[in-house]
Image (cartoon, rainbow, N blue to C red):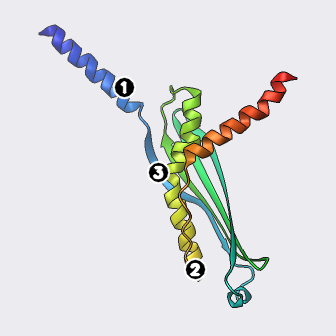
Amino acid sequence: MAEEQNNQANGAAQNEQQANAQFSIQRIYVKDVSFEAPNSPAIFRKEWKPELSVDMNVSNTKLEEGVHEVVLTLTVKNTVEGEVAFLCEVAQAGIFTIPADIPEQAMAHTVGAFCPTILFPYAREAVSALVTKGTFPQLNLAPINFDAVFAQHMQQQQQAQAPQADA
């Protein structure tokens, strides 16, 4: 009986440690936002045949042990007949609790793919709202597979380091 209680107590302690070491979202917020329509109102008179470009950047900062800020920045530029219709930039951020004892590769994937996957819908909505408020046609950015983007980034880094290793 005493052994069973010890096992239950040890199991509870292990469960508590695992619960304390789990991933969690502390906060999601807009860090920076910008919208420009430099050629309005003249741009509204042109035939709407837009050329859209979307740039994305992910950065992260370790705030303290096990706590990271991850920032997903989307820059959306739309041109019509070579003139900028609008330029929209949203830096969507989050503060995440990430277990400090996870392997380095898993940490890189967490801050480079998993966290941006969580942030993207918020950034996408902010871009859509800003474009709509600028009275431009609705813009819904396509979903992004951050796992694939991260894998491609890691492959490019490995290829860039390979020639250095041969030299």
Callout 2 secondary element = loop
The disc at residue 27 is 3
Q: Residue at x 72, y 38 (%)?
A: 156
- Residue 69 is at least partly visible in this image: no
- Residue 40 appears in which quarter of the rendering? bottom right
The disc at residue 137 is 2
Q: Residue at x 55, y 76 (%)?
A: 138
Callout 1 secondary element = helix
Is label 2 or label 1 in front?
A: 2
Q: Check contact, mark 2 vs mark 1: CB within 8 A.
A: no
Q: Earlier in the sequence, mark 1 or mark 3?
A: 1
- Residue 166 appears in which quarter of the rendering? top right
Q: Nearer the viewer, residue 149 or 73?
A: 149
Horizontal relation, residue 10 to residue 31: left or right: left
Residue 124 is situated, as x and y percent measured from the top left of the image, at 54, 63
Callout 3 secondary element = strand
Q: Earlier in the sequence, mark 3 or mark 2?
A: 3
Q: Residues within 10 Å of mark 2 (few under 14, many from 20)?
A: few
Q: Residue at x 56, y 72 (%)?
A: 139
Residue 26 is situated, as x and y percent measured from the top left of the image, at 45, 46
Q: Residues within 10 Å of mark 3 (few under 14, many from 20)?
A: few
Alpha-carbon span between mark 2 and mark 1: 50 Å
- Residue 139 is at least partly visible in this image: yes
> What amino acid is found at the position of numbered circle 1 in the picture?
Gln
Alpha-carbon span between mark 1 and mark 3: 22 Å
> What amino acid is found at the position of numbered circle 2 in the picture?
Pro
Q: Farthest left residue? A: 1
Quarter of the rendering occupied by the C terminus: top right
Q: Nearer the viewer, residue 137 or 14?
A: 137
